[in-house]
Image (spheres, rainbow, N blue to C red):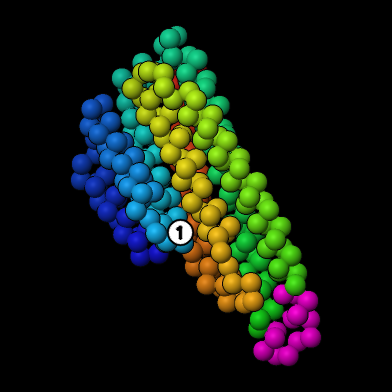
Amino acid sequence: MADSLEISKTTGHSRSISLPSTSHSLATAVEEQLQKLRSLDATSSSLASSAPRKLGGLKDLYDCIDDRLQMPLTQKALPHENHRSSMEVLLDGSLKLLDVCGNVKDVFSQMKECIQELESSSWRKRRRDPEQASEVETYIKSRKTLRKMVTKLLDHVRKMERKNDLRKHSKPEATLSILREAEEISFSVFESPLHVLSGPRERSKPISWSLALEMSIGEIEEGMECVFRRLVKTRAALLCIINC
């Protein structure tokens, strides 16, 4: 939690002191955020700690993108007929990002509920409740179901990444290029929290293993919610621009 808070404070301080006001400085700010995310991908060793940091970085990236979309120059350039097709592709991509982000949020919400039920059953065990054993079995079954959901989601995210890769080699207007790269790295970032749930676990001690994850799950769920709100805002800005 300390890492994500530190990032939030750092980025918030930077934005308050020097909010980019030109296309060039905004492009630089976006590239800096993209580079931070690439660096996290290359150097992260712990999935549980890196996932919240990546989500924090993604939130900051979309904050910079929103600044750029609000610029009069951008709002004048993007609706041009030459960019209509690219804008429609990006709007379609933004919808897919929201869908994936929402699904990842749901998985973590369900996992948190499973852990809360397990905590409750652990408490009853200390009170010698005979129903505790069956509740642990229920948890294990729910966990298996969630792992299947995570596997399907990971497969879906990877397919979205491949589709993006097939069309990233064209040379669109600068803002469109930024949005395309943001979409690509967003799918990559969404893989990270899913790996937290699909990674190794202690089969003989489901209670200990799951309770150890609880704090990370809470951070990730919060991060996913922040990113989801930014994606909604970005999509709304794109719709407003294209419908002007």
| Secondary structure mainly formed by the magenta segment | helix
Is 97 placed left or right of 62 in the picture?
A: right
Q: Is residue 49 visible?
A: yes
What span is in magenta? 124-136
Q: Is residue 132 magenta?
A: yes
Q: Specify the amino acid type for callout 1.
A: Leu
Residue placed most toward the observer, 12 or 109? 109
Q: With respect to residue 121, does 172 lie above or below?
A: above
Where residue 131 appears, x then y in whole percent? 79, 81
Name the image quarter holding the N terminus.
bottom left
Residue drawn at x 22%, y 32% as measured from the top left: 25
Residue drawn at x 70%, y 84% as measured from the top left: 124
The residue indicated by pointer 1 is 47
Where residue 16 appears, x then y in whole percent? 25, 46
Q: With respect to residue 61, does 116 lie above or below?
A: below
Q: Is residue 60 magenta?
A: no
